[in-house]
Image (cartoon, helix red, strand yellow):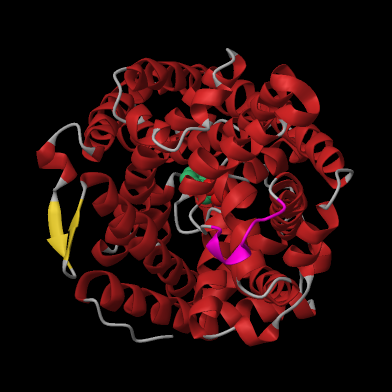
């Protein structure tokens, strides 16, 4: 298998695919509202510093490991550590984590697909009713939408790296940028839009406390798709002559630019169509923003643009979020699919079938955990609250294990694989990077304060989530 490893066709294709992974639901909704509520410009500044000084080195580390090993994360950890069992465990974590995150991300993508469909067929008024979301996530229609999303993911992934992932990214990402710009221009030219811009951007340094700092860093880490084995896998599909640090910088920049631009769409839209908004009441949860709050804002638009106009705007918005979600979903699901292919020598389609069957089973469990089936709805108890199956998957894999995976890759690269090997791979295709200040910074940070910070986040999350003890903030 190894000698015929699939590859991206071009550097642009790789960057778009990796940016497609990074740009997700969090960028479009979670980031803007989180930023606006937690210090505006002050939050943005801090976020940008975290992206470039903490997350970018981790992204470079992941891509480099993947390209050197030309393997999935399990194979990469195994080969580069000479089959050390401890590091093989880290490899396992890097394929189980994306599989489980794919499970709950699929469910959210299915909801978005459903809302897209409903707004296209003219049911915006219904989507704007407060009780709709609760009913919607417990309806049988959900399984029809789920079949639709799974079919799309299958269609993209069965095409392979170049004719599937890369081709989809080359179509979906420019379409996403275009829709985002259209919506931003539309929103910024409305009355009262500038109040939203001011709320988003005016810095308030008093709001920055330890928990905001922790939140901003976690958001940046998740937003760049780190700790999920994705950048290792995508890195293994890139040409040995390609400039890895340069590509990683562009991916980080694109992801941050999209998150920033999304703020210029969401907040002015809220302020313009609901001038009495009390900013403190805006929920930071992407879920309640997308599915409960924004449909009401879209419906407000009918007084200016008529029902059809308002439905069209809502449809473009949901299509935008859907494109962002589907490129992320594809990237994360590719990790276990690629692992099964190279570890077991399976054909792509067979691996897709096997992983897909698992994905469907677990996702159905997740979908049933909002009231449908009591066993899944009241799945577990910790830190004094009852958690659904969906909550447990989210808490364990998304919130807890991601920073742990980030910590492990830093330690692995510097202390096990060793700096010299890392730098040799890194400089291939980027001769100017050799000996540069940034290279020295990447080496130093990955071996020192980045793993320490990730360890603190990990320990804090475990204490807070499972024992109800707040160590920070
Ligand atoms: N960056 C993605 C987002 O913001 C995170 C992610 C990537 C989640 C891939 C799932 C799969 O949504």
Q: Is residue 51 left or right of residue 128?
A: right
**Residue in the picture at 30% in, 52% down:** 92
Q: Is residue 369 left or right of residue 12?
A: left
* Image-quadrant location for residue 133: top left
Q: Is residue 67 visible?
A: no
Vertical placement of residue 115 versus 282, above or below: above
**Residue in the picture at 25% in, 29% down:** 364
Q: Position of residue 323 (x, y in %)?
A: 62, 31
Taking depth in this image into account, of 220 and 439 the one nearest to the observer is 220
Q: Position of residue 200 (x, y in %)?
A: 73, 64
Considering every residue shown, the one lying at the far right of the view is 189
Q: Position of residue 61 (x, y in %)?
A: 57, 64
The magenta stretch spans residue 101: no
The secondary structure that most of the magenta stretch takes on is loop
Considering every residue shown, the one lying at the far left of the view is 375
Taking depth in this image into account, of 215 and 345 the one nearest to the observer is 215
User: Magenta region: which residues?
Assistant: 275-282
Taking depth in this image into account, of 388 and 159 the one nearest to the observer is 388
Q: Position of residue 43 (x, y in %)?
A: 67, 73
Q: Is residue 229 left or right of residue 311?
A: left
Q: Is residue 399 left or right of residue 118?
A: left
**Residue in the picture at 41% in, 31% down:** 132
Taking depth in this image into account, of 6 and 202 the one nearest to the observer is 202
């Amino acid at each position: 298998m190894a000698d015929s490893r699939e590859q991206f066709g071009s550097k642009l294709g790789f960057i778009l695919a990796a940016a497609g992974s990074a740009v997700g639901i969090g960028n479009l909704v979670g980031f803007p509202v989180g930023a606006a509520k937690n210090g505006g410009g002050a939050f943005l500044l801090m976020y940008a510093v975290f992206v470039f000084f903490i997350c970018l080195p981790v992204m470079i580390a992941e891509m480099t490991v993947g390209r050197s090993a030309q393997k999935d994360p399990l194979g990469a950890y195994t080969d580069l550590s000479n089959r050390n069992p401890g590091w093989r465990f880290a490899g396992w974590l890097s394929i189980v984590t994306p599989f489980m995150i794919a499970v709950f991300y699929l469910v959210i993508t299915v909801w978005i697909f459903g809302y897209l469909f409903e707004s296209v067929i003219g049911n915006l008024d219904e989507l704007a009713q407060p009780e709709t979301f609760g009913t919607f996530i417990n309806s049988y229609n959900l399984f029809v939408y789920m079949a639709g999303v799974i079919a799309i993911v299958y269609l993209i992934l069965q095409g392979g790296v170049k004719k599937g992932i890369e081709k989809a990214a080359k179509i979906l990402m420019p379409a996403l940028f275009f829709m985002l710009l259209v919506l931003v221009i539309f929103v910024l030219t409305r009355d009262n839009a500038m109040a939203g811009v001011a709320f988003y951007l005016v810095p308030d340094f008093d709001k920055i406390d330890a928990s905001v700092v922790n939140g901003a860093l976690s958001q940046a880490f998740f937003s760049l798709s780190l700790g999920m084995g994705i950048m290792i896998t995508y890195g293994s599909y890139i040409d040995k002559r390609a400039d890895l640090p340069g590509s990683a910088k562009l991916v980080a920049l694109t992801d941050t630019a999209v998150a920033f631009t999304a703020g210029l769409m969401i907040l002015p839209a809220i302020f313009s169509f609901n001038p009495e908004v009390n900013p403190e009441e805006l929920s930071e949860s992407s879920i309640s923003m997308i599915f409960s709050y924004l449909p009401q804002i879209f419906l407000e638009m009918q007084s200016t643009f008529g029902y059809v106009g308002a439905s069209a705007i809502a449809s473009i918005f949901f299509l935008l979020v859907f494109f962002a979600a589907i490129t992320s979903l594809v990237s994360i699901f590719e990790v276990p699919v690629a692992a099964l292919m190279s570890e077991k020598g399976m054909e792509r389609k067979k691996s897709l079938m096997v992983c897909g069957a698992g994905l469907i089973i677990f996702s159905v469990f997740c979908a049933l955990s909002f009231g449908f089936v009591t066993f899944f709805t009241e799945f577990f108890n910790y830190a004094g609250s009852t958690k659904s199956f969906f909550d447990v998957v989210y808490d364990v894999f998304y919130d807890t294990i991601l920073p742990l995976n980030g910590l492990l890759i830093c330690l692995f690269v510097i202390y096990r694989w060793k700096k010299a090997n890392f730098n040799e791979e890194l400089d291939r295709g980027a001769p100017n990077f050799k000996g540069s200040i940034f290279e020295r910074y990447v080496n130093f940070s990955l071996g020192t304060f980045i793993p320490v910070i990730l360890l603190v986040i990990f320990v804090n999350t475990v204490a807070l989530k499972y024992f109800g003890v707040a160590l920070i903030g």
